[in-house]
Amino acid sequence: MFKLTEILLSISNLHYKYSSLILSVGFIALGISVFFYPAELSQNAGIALFITGFLFGLLILMKSKRN
């Protein structure tokens, strides 16, 4: 039973790590698209989204290196 719990925990940790990185890449892509094609949002919003995605990605990568 404990081995099954360890496997489930490792799968959930991998899911958390990669879903957060995908979210970070999404923020970066959205920020770049808003910066170059500001239809309804300003370029400042694109820069803010890009920085948010970049810092969020760094946070996830730094957290994974500590463990």
Image: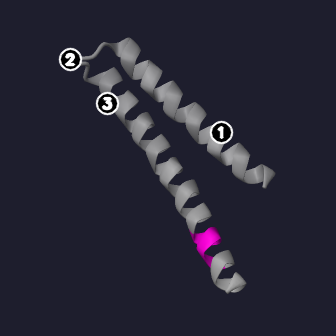
- Disc 2 residue type (three-letter): Glu
Residue holding disc 2:
40
Toward the viewer: 22 or 3?
A: 3
**Mark 3 neighbour density, 10 Å: few (under 14) some (14–19) many (20 or more):** some
Mark 2 burial class by Cα count in 10 Å: few <14, some 14-19, many 20+: few
Q: Earlier in the sequence, mark 2 or mark 1?
A: 2
**Residue highlighted by disc 3:** 33
Q: Which segment is the magenta one?
A: 7-11
* Residue located 46% across and 20% down the image: 48
Image quadrant containing the N terminus = bottom right
**Which of the pair 59/37 is nearer the observer?**
59
How far across and down, in percent of the image, does residue 57 sit? 58, 41
The C terminus is located in which quarter? Answer: bottom right
Whether residue 11 sits left or right of residue 22 in the image: it is right
Q: Position of residue 61 (x, y in %)?
A: 66, 47
| Magenta portion: prevailing SS class | helix
Looking at this view, is 32 or 56 the one in front?
56
Instruction: Find residue 22 and report its horizontal and vertical position in percent.
Output: 46, 50
Q: Secondary structure at mark 1?
A: helix
**How far is disc 3 from disc 1 in space, using C-alphas?**
23 Å
Residue at left 53%, top 62%?
Answer: 15
- Mark 3 lies on a secondary structure that is helix
Instruction: Return the residue at label 1.
Output: 59
Within the image, what quadrant is residue 37 found in?
A: top left
Q: In this view, which residue lies farthest toward the right? A: 66
* Dot 3 or dot 2, earlier in sequence: 3
C-alpha distance separating marks 2 and 1: 29 Å
Residue under the image location 35 percent in, 21 percent down: 35
- Identify whether 25 is placed above or below 30: below
Q: For residue 7, what is the image quadrant?
A: bottom right
Answer few, some or many: residues within 10 Å of disc 1's Cα (few below 14, many 20 plus, some between 14 and 19). some
Q: CA distance from mark 3 to mark 2?
A: 12 Å
